[in-house]
């Protein structure tokens, strides 16, 4: 039946930080679209070549290509006991396609990590990365030395306040409909991501434990028609 988990949440909510340990504790593969994309490009599959051309042009990879890559990944044997999806779906089209792919598996457990916009802004604006080893620090002063290699800390262009505001707006516009798509399901839970990381971790584990029973019941909540 499997334990099929989707993590939703804006940039800076700690979705990636939570997805790793959650997958690890249950011995499930963590599937991030960034990773599959890199893997597909490296292994030169047909979808990988299409994606490579798109990325090289500076364009966004289409729903169709992303869906194709996730479908290939979920067809692999190691996902039979379940998986933790991080970064997919991002659109209703992707969510509908995912429901079709999983029609004969246990219902999706959907966890949405929420953090107030002002807190996300504070977190992302405070973030510094090492210019030398790329280590990420939640708080740091630009120009001070990296704790790992001594290289200079810098702020990524992506993390500047104006860019962060725009990223959060894009996120809200694109994914609020997604939350509505899942919200009515018995296997949906919202997690308060403004708490300390270890508390969020416990809430995530508790939610999965609580929702697993509902997920095993016959799927009455598949939104797609075929
Ligand atoms: Zn460093």
Image: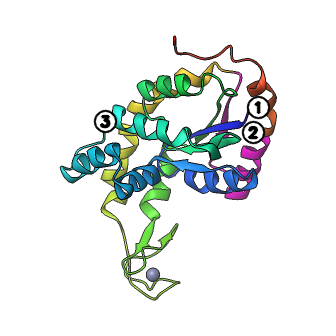
Picture quadrant of residue 42 = bottom left
Q: Which mark is residue 159?
A: none
Q: Is residue 131 left or right of residue 204?
A: left
Q: Is residue 126 left or right of residue 202?
A: left
Q: Quadrant of the N terminus?
A: top right
Residue 112 appears in view = no
Callout 2 crowding tier (Cα within 10 Å): few <14, some 14–19, many ≥20: many
Q: Residue at x 38, y 83 (%)?
A: 152
Q: Which residues are magenta?
A: 186-206
Report whether 39 appears left or right of 198: left
Confirm or deny contact between disc 2 and disc 1 (CB under 8 A).
yes
10 Å crowding of disc 1: few (<14), some (14-19), many (20+): many
Q: Are marks 3 and 1 in contact (CB under 8 Å)?
A: no
Along the polypeptide, which appears first: circle 3 or circle 1?
3
Residue with the most extreme bottom position = 150
Q: CA distance from mark 3 to mark 2?
A: 31 Å
Label 2 C-beta lies within 8 Å of the nearest ligand 1 atom: no
Q: Which mark is residue 208?
A: 2
| x then y, percent, for residue 25 | 75, 54
- Which percent across, then down, holds residue 76? 57, 43
Provide the residue designation for mark 3: 62
Q: Secondary structure at mark 1?
A: helix
**Residue at 52% in and 84% down:** 148
**124 left or right, relative to 154:** right
**Mark 3 or 1: the one toward you:** 3
Q: CA distance from mark 2 to mark 1?
A: 5 Å
Quadrant of the displayed image that contains ligand 1: bottom left
Q: Is residue 121 above or below residue 174?
A: below
Q: Earlier in the sequence, mark 3 or mark 2?
A: 3
- Residue that badge 1 annotates: 211
As helix, strand or loop, the secondary structure at mark 2 comes to helix
Position of 112 relative to 137 (above/below): above
């Amino acid at each position: 039946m499997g334990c099929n988990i989707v993590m939703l949440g804006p940039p800076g909510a700690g979705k990636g930080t939570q997805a790793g340990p959650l997958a690890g504790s249950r011995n499930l593969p963590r599937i991030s679209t960034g990773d599959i994309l890199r893997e597909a490009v490296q292994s030169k599959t047909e979808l990988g070549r299409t994606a490579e051309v798109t990325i090289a042009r500076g364009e966004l990879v289409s729903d169709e290509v992303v869906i194709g890559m996730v479908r290939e990944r979920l067809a692999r044997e190691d996902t039979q006991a379940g998986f933790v999806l991080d970064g997919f779906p991002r659109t209703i089209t992707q969510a509908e396609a995912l429901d079709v792919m999983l029609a004969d598996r246990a219902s999706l457990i959907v966890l949405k990590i929420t953090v107030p916009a002002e807190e996300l802004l504070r977190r992302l604006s405070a973030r510094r990365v090492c210019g030398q080893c790329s280590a990420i620090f939640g708080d740091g002063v630009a120009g001070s030395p990296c704790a790992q290699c001594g290289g200079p800390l810098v702020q990524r262009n992506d993390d500047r306040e104006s860019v962060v505001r725009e990223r959060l707006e894009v996120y809200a516009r694109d994914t609020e409909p997604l939350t509505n798509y899942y919200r009515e399901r018995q296997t949906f839970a919202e997690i308060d991501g403004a708490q300390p990381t270890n508390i969020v971790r416990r809430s995530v584990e508790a939610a999965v434990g609580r929702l697993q029973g509902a997920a095993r019941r016959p799927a009455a909540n598949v939104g797609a028609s075929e």
